[in-house]
């Protein structure tokens, strides 16, 4: 006897359900297997090695210069236009904005989860020669004495910015910062520029007294008060005996190094910028201005020339995009070209946030030192900074160490231990797996 139709129908439905469940199970298992395989391949292939390209930045477009002034950009802010052409230092059509247009980024690479190494006795390896022959060099980020910072200093005194540093700049052999402001009582504000800075000359007395030995002027604010403001700045620095690089009364001066001799080691310091708002900011034969590296040929010649006569060549460079924590391919290519030409250490700035560190041919490229003495932005990443300390020997070999700081309004303050540990972990993660940073801030190449 045949079973009733209802029974056949139920058997068929149950059979269909079993087939669907089996199909789903195979599909899910296959998907999981493919995902696990992809993750394993991503991990082993993407692990960074020296010379690898950095990860793609999280921010695809360059923010406006509002970050520099600690304010949010207005809703109707005009679109960012191109800076002077990279193929030539002088563009036929000067532009009015201050930021670089975003450039294509290199393909992303995976960064392993960072783990800080414990501090090792003796640090991360010093330069050549006996310990007594090494020089200690400190580098810090962007410095202004304008706007809200200037108002604060009028109340607290011009030595206030250095009051929490414990005299660390007096205990080294050379300290260099990026002076991101004209120092003048005159000048005319640059046109078509959203933010212009102007700082009081009295601030330079406190800067020198704190132990700062030299400043970089190759940046996108040195001519905020026009040529008159730049010439005043040069004059005030010269009057106080503060060496400066990266800008001058003409191109020869702008591209000329400052020289120092410490413990028998000859040091050459150079400054360049790849961020300017107008092509006429570039120094010319008879034109005051800054040393540009939109075309880097003059810079590379200067580096090679200095390496022939000095033990240690240091380049301070202004580059990258504001508030973008990952360095990009343009920065990497330019930084490597400096080392290929003979630089022993490259220290970058302009993004107002810390960026990663790259070892290249036995040298260091620190892509951004962040803010130092600056206004207080609404972006938390701009509150984090560090002093970058290099120990260098007579052959030009350097070690590198970071001292984490909070960039408070107008004053850097050392971080507590836990915040400092987190900051070191962050910088290590931004370094594309190329370095390990120990708990004492010492930077070593990843194994």
Image: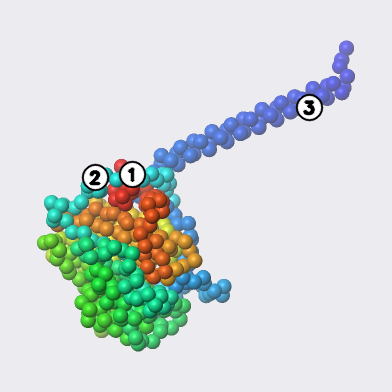
Relative side of 163 to 195, left or right = left
Q: CA distance from mark 1 to mark 2?
A: 12 Å
Which structural element holds mark 3? helix
* Mark 1 closeness class: few <14, some 14–19, many ≥20 residues within 10 Å: some
Mark 3 neighbour class, 10 Å CA radius: few under 14, some 14 to 19, many 20 or more: few
Mark 2 lies on residue:
121
Mark in the foreground, 2 or 3: 2
Q: Which mark is residue 38?
A: none
CB-based contact (under 8 Å), mark 1 and mark 2? no
Q: Residue at x 20, y 51 (%)?
A: 126
Quadrant in the picture for residue 196: bottom left
Q: CA distance from mark 2 to mark 3?
A: 73 Å
Picture coordinates of residue 346, whole percent (x, y): 28, 61
Instruction: Measuring from the top left, give residue 235's x and y in whole percent.
Output: 25, 82
* Coordinates of residue 198 in the picture (x, y in percent): 37, 80
Q: Locate residue 106: give its quadrant.
A: bottom left
Task: Say if residue 330 shows up in the picture.
Answer: no
Q: Considering the numbered disc 2 on the image, is that residue within a helix, a strand or a loop? A: loop
Contact, CB < 8 Å: mark 3 with mark 1?
Answer: no
Label 3 or label 1, whichever lies nearer to me, is: 1
Upstream in sequence: badge 2 or badge 3? 3
Give the mark toward the camera: 1 or 2.
2
Q: Nearer the viewer, residue 31 or 269?
A: 269
The residue at the point 17 percent across, 69 percent down is 259
If you read the primary sequence from the N terminus, does the residue marked by circle 3 or circle 1 appear first? Answer: 3
**Residue that carries the numbered disc 3 in the rendered image:** 13
Residue 17 at least partly seen: yes
Residue tagged 1: 117
Q: Residue at x 70, y 30 (%)?
A: 20
Q: Quadrant of the C terminus?
A: top left
């Amino acid at each position: 006897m045949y079973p009733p139709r209802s029974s056949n129908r139920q058997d068929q439905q149950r059979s269909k359900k079993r087939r669907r469940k089996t199909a789903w199970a195979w599909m899910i298992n296959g998907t999981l297997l493919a995902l696990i395989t992809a993750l394993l391949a991503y991990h082993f292939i993407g692990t960074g090695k020296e010379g690898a390209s950095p990860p793609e930045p999280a921010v695809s477009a360059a923010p406006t210069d509002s970050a520099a002034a600690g304010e949010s950009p207005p809703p109707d802010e005009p679109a960012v236009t191109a800076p002077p052409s990279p193929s030539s230092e002088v563009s036929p059509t000067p532009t009015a904005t201050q930021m670089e247009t975003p450039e294509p980024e290199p393909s992303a690479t995976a960064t392993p989860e960072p783990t800080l190494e414990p501090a090792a006795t003796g640090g991360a390896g010093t330069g050549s020669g006996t310990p007594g022959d090494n020089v200690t060099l400190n580098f810090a980020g962007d410095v202004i004495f304008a706007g809200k910072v200037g108002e604060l200093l009028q109340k607290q005194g011009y030595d206030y910015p250095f009051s929490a540093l414990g005299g660390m700049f007096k205990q080294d052999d050379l300290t260099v910062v990026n002076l991101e402001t004209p120092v003048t009582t005159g000048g005319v504000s640059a046109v078509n520029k959203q933010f212009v800075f102007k700082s009081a000359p009295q601030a330079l007395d406190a800067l020198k007294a704190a132990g700062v030995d030299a400043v970089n002027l190759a940046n996108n604010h040195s001519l905020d008060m026009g040529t008159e403001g730049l010439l005043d700045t040069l004059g005030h620095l010269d009057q106080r005996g503060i060496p400066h690089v990266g800008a001058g009364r003409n191109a020869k001066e702008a591209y000329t190094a400052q020289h120092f001799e410490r413990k028998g080691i000859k040091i050459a310091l150079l400054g360049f910028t790849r961020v300017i708002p107008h092509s006429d900011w570039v120094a010319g034969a008879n034109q005051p201005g800054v040393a540009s590296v939109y075309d880097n040929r003059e810079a590379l010649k200067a580096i090679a020339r200095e390496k022939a006569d000095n033990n240690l060549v240091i380049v301070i460079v202004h580059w990258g995009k504001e508030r973008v924590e990952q360095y990009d391919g343009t920065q990497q290519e330019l930084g490597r070209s400096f080392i290929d030409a003979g630089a022993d250490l490259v220290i970058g700035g302009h993004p107002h946030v810390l960026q990663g560190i790259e070892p290249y041919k036995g040298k260091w490229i620190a892509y951004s030192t962040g803010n130092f003495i600056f206004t207080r932005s609404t972006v938390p990443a701009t509150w984090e900074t560090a002093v970058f300390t290099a120990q260098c020997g007579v052959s030009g070999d350097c070690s590198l160490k970071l001292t984490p700081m909070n960039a408070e309004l107008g004053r850097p303050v050392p971080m507590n231990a836990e915040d400092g540990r987190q900051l070191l972990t962050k910088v290590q993660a931004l370094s594309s797996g190329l370095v390990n940073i120990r708990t004492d801030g010492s930077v070593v190449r990843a194994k």
